[in-house]
Image: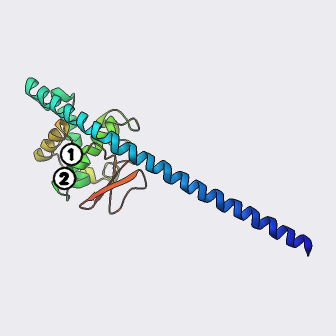
Amino acid sequence: MKRLNDISRNLGSVLAMLTAITVLLCVLALLVAATIKLCYWFVEPVFAEADTRVAIEQAEGIQKTGTIEESCGVTQEEIELIALVTMAEAEGECEEGKRLVIDTILNRVDSEYFPDSIHDVVYQPNQFEAMWNGRVDRCEVRDDICQLVREELASRTNSDVLFFMAGQYSAYGEPLFQVDNHYFSTY
């Protein structure tokens, strides 16, 4: 009986230590999250200013060369591919929702975590559902969507979005916001 009491006391001590360690890990996780958020608050305005400068430089480049395609190094075929994916993924969405789908593609091309070309981003396996479920085959390239792509190339609505999903947030990344039926996220 004494041995059973000793084991019970030892087990209680172990459980108390595990609880204390769990609490410390939770506090540490909260501190890390708060630090990341603080860094974002201080660094984000710098990036916003840089994005504005880039948009102005791109606009000046467009005025000099005459087309967004020439100044951004994007071909008409790539613009049409982005427009086609946008139609397949966001045909029933509002204009802002379509722009954000376009931005998702462009942001992925710029991201270190995704391929470096529009074609490779669009055709990356299991990324854009419409590209592998047959939906894209029932869509067509529209001039108004191509124009949205050109406008987003000149100045993006959002340079953070990397994921979107219909009906709920993706399992990947940090949720950002919802527009119509799409939920947008980032890393």
Give the alpha-carbon distance from disc 2 to disc 1, as whole Å. 8 Å
Q: Position of residue 41 (x, y in %)?
A: 34, 45
| In this picture, residue 123 sits left or right of residue 34 | left
The answer to whether residue 2 is above or below residue 84 is below
User: Which residue appears at 23% of the width and 61% of the height?
Assistant: 180
User: Which residue appears at 35% of the width and 62% of the height?
Assistant: 168
Q: Which mark is residue 98?
A: none
Circle 2: is it few (<14), some (14-19), or many (20+) Cα within 10 Å?
Answer: few
Which residue is under mark 2?
Answer: 96
Residue 85 seen in the current view: no
In the picture, the quarter occupied by the N terminus is bottom right
Q: Secondary structure at mark 1?
A: loop
Residue 15 sits in quarter: bottom right
User: What amino acid is found at the position of numbered circle 1 in the picture?
Assistant: Thr
Which residue is under mark 1?
Answer: 157
Residue 181 sits in quarter: bottom left
* Contact between labelled residues 1 and 2, with CB atoms less than 8 Å apart: yes
The answer to whether residue 134 is above or below residue 112 is below
